[in-house]
Image: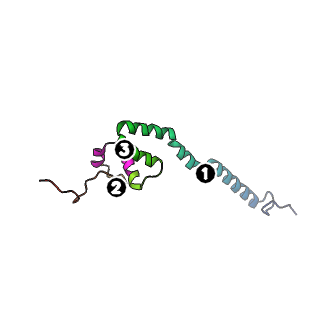
């Protein structure tokens, strides 16, 4: 009688070889595939504090009135509406008219963009 391995299969049997191959494949896949937490860490580092500070400096120089918006967004204290506003402002570099006249209808935020004139909310002067 042959000795059994850890899984109860005879060493050298087809069942034992199959288990070994599956275990090896799983280990290789685990080594080559980054974990979810490591991806989140890398993404978090992509936009480092230094980059945020540089961006805040540029906003401060070009549009000081928008600085508090960007600070609250970077601090994670902004509403979804404020985040969309900051995104759009950043995309066209602080040009409100460009946001208002945006033609990027494929953008998922197009209908939510700020600075749109709403119909019926303002009286028209004749």
Q: Residue furthest left?
A: 126
Q: Position of residue 30 (x, y in %)?
A: 65, 51
Q: Nearer the viewer, residue 72 or 80?
A: 72
Name the dominant secondary structure of the magenta segment. Answer: helix
Q: Nearer the viewer, residue 90 or 26?
A: 90
Residue that mark 3 sits on: 66
For the point 43% across and 40% down, which residue is it? 56
Q: Position of residue 81 (x, y in %)?
A: 38, 54
Q: Earlier in the sequence, mark 2 or mark 1?
A: 1
Residue that mark 2 sits on: 112
Q: Which residues are magenta?
A: 84-102
Q: Position of residue 85 (x, y in %)?
A: 37, 50
SS class, disc 1: loop
Residue that mark 1 sits on: 35
Q: Say above or below: 11 vs 70.
A: below
Taking the magenta stretch, the answer to whether it contains residue 87 is yes
Q: Residue furthest right?
A: 1
SS class, disc 2: helix
């Amino acid at each position: 009688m042959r000795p059994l391995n850890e899984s109860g299969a005879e060493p050298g049997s087809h069942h034992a070889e199959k288990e070994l191959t599956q275990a090896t494949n799983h280990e290789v896949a685990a080594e080559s595939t980054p974990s979810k937490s490591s991806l989140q860490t890398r993404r978090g580092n992509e936009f480092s504090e230094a980059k945020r500070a540089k961006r805040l400096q540029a906003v401060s120089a070009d549009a000081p009135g928008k600085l508090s918006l960007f600070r609250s967004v970077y601090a994670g204290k902004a509403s979804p509406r404020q985040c969309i506003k900051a995104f759009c402002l950043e995309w066209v570099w602080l040009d409100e008219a460009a946001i208002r006249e945006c033609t990027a209808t494929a953008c998922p935020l197009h209908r939510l963009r700020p600075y749109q004139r709403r119909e019926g909310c303002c009286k028209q002067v004749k």
